[in-house]
Image: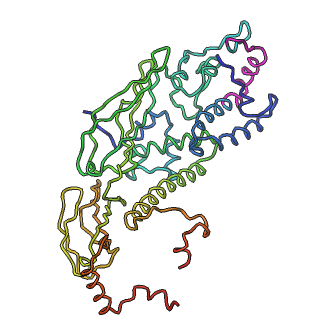
Amino acid sequence: MKRTLSIISLSELCQLENIENEVIIEIVEYGIVKPVEDSETADWEFETSSVYWIKKAVQLYQDFEIDWLAVALLIELMQQRDSLRKENEFFNNSLNAFCNIKYTRWNNLATMPANIYLI
Amino acid sequence: MEFKDYYKILGVSADAEAQEIKTAYRKLARKYHPDMNPDEGAEEKFKEVAEAYEVLKDKGRRAKFDDLRKYGRQSAGGFEPPPGWQAKRSTGFENEFQFDNQFSDFFNSIFGGGAFQQAHFNGHSQQRQFRGEDVETDLAVFLEETLHQQIKTVAYQLPVYDGKTVRHIKKHLNVKIPQGVSDGERIRLKGQGKPGHGGGEAGDLYLHIRLVPHPLFDVQGADLILTLPVAPWEAALGAKVTVPTLEGSINLTIAPNSQSGKKLRIKGKGLKRKAVTGDLYAILKVIMPPTSNDEANQLWRKLAEINAFDPRTEWGERK
């Protein structure tokens, strides 16, 4: 039986992923991820879900040669997009359950069914 | 070995200035980066572009590549380096990038691997051991399974390099999934990723939790939403109905004169998270009987006569 872990310490994260301390501090300072508790840097721990975003941040920083502020903005928008997609899916499901209609995006008024358009 | 013309990949001439190379790379990175472009093949294209830039942005590497490009030749068997030319192997890092899978054979044969280091991110570049890469796999979890700790079998594939080729082996792990996992969460299994090299430890496995859509319940945060169909007379007169939850069913009282769309909260019957337990919301949906008969129609008519109700008053006077 394998045990799953949901927390990783700063030192383990740096060592395993070959990322320097200072880089993680930048990533936290720009609000890309935050430690589980607001403690001394050396005692920082992160949720394992954050590791994905830390690695993504390092990757974007290197690939696009952009600064941490831009990385932070990019990641915030990515996360916003993900949650909007999820929310959209939820509303679509609710709409389907309630109206028994398949939701279609009406791109313009001309393609909207007459009975809705004329009200 | 296939020759890669890094200038052609970036779409610049062989005498391009450093700034021109940088601009070309950035434009292509914007176009093909896997985070910007989900199309199939974009990621491969980006890797090629990144490799070209890795070589051309560095003066030393660019000079070496220029020599090879000038004096090597293309033959039927592929690209041949000029006579006497030998890839410089520095400090025993030979296989680093072959394992890493990041760069092409062509890159590895010219620059060995030791020549390239991940600049300031790589605090351990002098080690000869290499830790295996982390691996991520999606794990489908049913809503019911999040209520208690579960043991699930995770099946995934790992690429294994046997010194010549890369094979994919299937792995199965029995894993304890903690109670209260949520959609999109990632949990870690130490040492279950790609194997390390030169005695280095294995990478980790990350399980990306995906909640399977439920036929009855929608998820909103820790709450569950259920559409509860009721007959018109149940909505009018009130009723006691049996409602499913994730764990067994419960009885629910519908108040008389309930509106379609009304939300009924059933406390504590949502999803269980580490800190909170969500609620279940039943949303009433009044359903007309699909067929009618004379007797029923008579009763409806009677209802219409005694009710001065107009559901469309908000629209105002209409002709």
Please state the horizontal and vertical placement of residue A80, each as a whole percent of the image.
50, 56
Q: Which residues are magenta?
A: B54-77
Looking at this view, name the residue that lies furthest to the top: B84
**Image quarter in which the N terminus of chain B is found:** top right
Q: How is the image coloured?
A: rainbow
Q: Is residue B149 left or right of residue A63?
A: left
Q: Residue at x 43, y 63 (%)?
A: A91
Main SS category, magenta section:
helix
Please state the horizontal and vertical placement of residue B137, each as a whole percent of the image.
40, 37
Q: Is residue A59 left or right of residue B308?
A: right
Find out whether residue A1 is within the magenta segment: no
Please state the horizontal and vertical placement of residue B89, each as a whole percent of the image.
61, 14
Corner quadrant of residue B279: bottom left
Q: Residue at x 20, y 75 (%)?
A: B239
Corner quadrant of residue B289: bottom left
Please state the horizontal and vertical placement of residue B76, each as a whole percent of the image.
70, 12
Q: In front here: A70 or B125?
A: A70
Count of number-bearing discs = 0
Q: In front here: A10 or B288?
A: B288
Whether A86 is drawn above or below B133: the answer is below
